[in-house]
Image (tube, grey):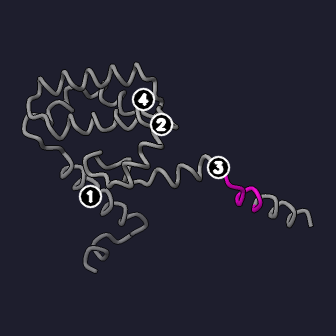
Amino acid sequence: MCVDLNKNLILAKKQQSDPYIDLLKVLLPELLIIQNQNKWTTSQQNRATILFKLYPKIEKAYNLAQKLKYIYENNNDKNVARLKLAKWYNQVEKEGFKSFNTIARTIQNHYENILNYFNNRSTNASAESFNAKIKEFRNQFRGVRDVKFFLYI
């Protein structure tokens, strides 16, 4: 009886709806936040206008994310990127968004390595992918006693 009561209470709590969350679900589809404003449909522009009016912090966070994306997409000069990343970092600190602390700290800790991307716009993603494949292959050997037989199969 007690277990059924607890299950019903948990189910009732899950079914209760928060009006703010419902509003955000309507106004904030994932594409709206990911896409650049230039690619928004008229409907998305209207939703964003309402959303940003109700929640100005979301607009500031959106603009910060778009500025960082813009830095990576539109800069080929390492020195220009250095200056823009520093300004972006200062703006993140000024706004005080906790959600941006991780990326800001990563940029601060790996500043020179990140700036190397702007030399020839390449990353070490292929090397990371290859290392992951090696780790996955190595993990397949766990529990195998006869490695020669395992490789033969």
Disc 1 vs disc 4: Cβ atoms closer than 8 Å? no
Toward the viewer: 6 or 24?
Answer: 24
**From what the image shows, is residue 126 above or below residue 152?**
above
The amino acid type found where label 2 is placed reads: Lys
Q: Which residue is disc 2 drawn over?
A: 53
Q: Which residue is disc 1 drawn over?
A: 134
Residue at coordinates 27% horizontally, 34% vertically from top-left? 67
Residue 30 image point, x, y percent: 41, 53
| Nearest-to-viewer mark from 2 and 1 | 2
Residue at coordinates 35% horizontally, 72% vertically from top-left? 146
Q: Is residue 131 magenta?
A: no
Label 1 residue SS: helix
**From what the image shows, is residue 122 above or below residue 85?**
below
Decide which of tag 2 and tag 3 comes sooner along the chain: 3
Decide which of tag 1 and tag 4 comes sooner along the chain: 4
Q: Which residue is disc 3 drawn over?
A: 19
Residue 39 image point, x, y percent: 26, 51
**From what the image shows, is residue 145 above or below residue 91?**
below
Q: Which residue is disc 4 drawn over?
A: 101
Query: Callout 2: few (<14), some (14-19), or many (20+) C-alpha neighbours within 10 Å?
Result: few
